[in-house]
Image: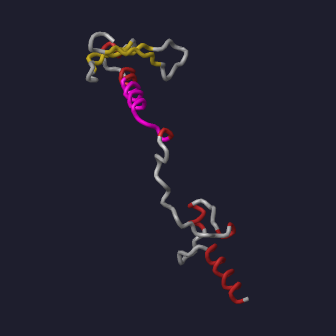
Amino acid sequence: MYGINTVCILQVLHSQSLTVEPLESWFIASQYGVVETAHCTCMAGLGESCSHVGATLCFVVDVVRNTQLLSVTDVAAYWPVPGLTNVPYAKVQDINFGTPAKLLADRDEEGTSRKHLTSAKRQNNLLKA
């Protein structure tokens, strides 16, 4: 920290080649978060307009936000209670675990599934017995 400005220096790895030396990206920010200047050791960084500087700024913003926020496990019952209260009972043999494409293929011309018809026939036979 120098005066009221902060200097942040980070190393940025190359995305296409991990064997090349990392780049050095840095910026100077005021106490209010205004970026005064930013540079990188890549070719475009000398013009203050490379993606490495942007990645560095995004990283710092993410770190600052994550240190100020509470995570889900920091607070008891932080997540909402599930709204599903009534789960219909069904036998495993009556549940269709097929894919949506398979469900469409099992439909007949009236739009009723064949499995539903066989379950209905089975129920009618049980009622008659």
State the residue at coordinates (59%, 66%).
Answer: 105
Quadrant (top left/top right/bottom left/bottom right) for the C terminus? bottom right
Residue 104 on image: x %, y %: 56, 66
The residue sitting at the top extreme is: 2
Quarter location, residue 45: top left
Residue 114 on image: x %, y %: 62, 74
| Residue 51 as seen in the image, left or right of residue 102 | left
Quadrant (top left/top right/bottom left/bottom right) for the N terminus? top left
Please state the total of marks drawn on the protein image.
Answer: 0
Foreground residue, 58 or 32?
32
| Residue 11 as seen in the image, left or right of residue 36 | right
The residue sitting at the front extreme is: 76
Is 41 magenta? The answer is: no
Residue 61 on image: x %, y %: 37, 28
Foreground residue, 59 or 12?
59
Foreground residue, 99 or 32?
32
The colour mode here is secondary structure
Q: Is residue 40 above or below residue 107?
A: above
Residue numbers of the magenta segment? 57-72
State the residue at coordinates (43%, 37%).
Answer: 70
Quarter location, residue 87: bottom right
Q: Is residue 100 above or below residue 123?
A: above
Prevalent SS, magenta region: helix
